[in-house]
Amino acid sequence: MDLEKPNNIYKFHSMNLHLIEMLTNNSFHMSERKYLNDPFDSGFKITLDDYLKLYKERYPSLLTTKEQYESATFLFNANMENGEIDWARGIEHDKSIKKITCFTENYANPLMWAHYAQNHTGVCLNFCTAKDENFKNSLQPVNYLEELIEIKCITDFEKSLLTKLHPWSIEKEWRIISSKEKFHFKRDALVEIIFGLKVKDDTISWFKGVLEGVFYMHTSIKKLRIKHSKIYILNEYDEIMQPLK
């Protein structure tokens, strides 16, 4: 999927110590697939024949006898029956499964604020990708499909990390994939933080002090407010900037 990379990309986050750690170390935590909220996120289909073919390519010495084939077949059938698929990713990597961190083009979607900003008690971070070339180059769009992809070759495992079922397409998601635990970003790239409706003013003031202490003086502080039955984005002086569309 060949999409133009967005000039601004957004990351929702809970107000917790992990957020402070992320900003202090200017690095995103990379998560394994099993920790994602959708059990079908990055899922895939694989047949026994394709599994045995890839397993033999990866570990040729472990499939040389009839007993070894029978053992591998039993393991495959048992895991498929139990709905387990992540174990099959072990074919691809020696030491670790690749990890991901997620972003969105759509900061204004109310469902995103409910799901990923902990029902408006969290924040939305706005990154300007033009200020961090490595960040921008590492972004990859999620592909929304009607069915899970079918694994036919080793590279299909990484493709699956960029797939979700079509009902999730409203998220307009982008991802960074890495085998590392952290992905560093330039502090200048974080241009704006928008606080949810339920974040208290004194918490925002405290957080602003924390930001200045870890070199984010340039980052604009915004917050959401309900006015006249609509949600608006306000600056730190309670001046209306724009409606949340």
Image (spheres, rainbow, N blue to C red):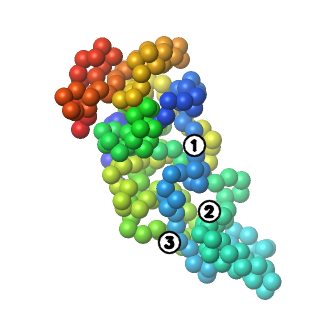
Q: Is residue 67 above or below residue 37?
A: below
Q: Position of residue 42 (x, y in %)?
A: 51, 59
Identify the secondary structure beneath mark 2: helix
- Circle 1 sits on which residue? 30
Task: Please identify the quadrant where the C terminus is shown.
Answer: top left
Q: Is residue 142 above or below residue 209?
A: below
The residue sitting at 39% across, 29% down in the picture is 198
- Considering depth in this image, is 114 or 45 the residue closer to the camera? 114
Q: Position of residue 92 (x, y in %)?
A: 64, 62
Q: Is residue 116 left or right of residue 52?
A: left
Q: Amino acid at mark 2?
A: Asp
Q: Position of residue 117 (x, y in %)?
A: 43, 37
The residue sitting at 49% across, 34% down in the picture is 14
Among numbered discs 3 and 2, the one appearing first in the sequence: 2
Identify the secondary structure beneath mark 1: loop
Task: Please identify the quadrant where the N terminus is shown.
Answer: bottom left
- Label 3 and label 2: CA atoms lie apart by 14 Å
The residue sitting at 69% across, 68% down in the picture is 58
Q: Could you say which disc has been placed on residue 150 in the image? A: 3
Q: Is residue 37 left or right of residue 107?
A: right
Q: Is residue 69 above or below residue 199?
A: below
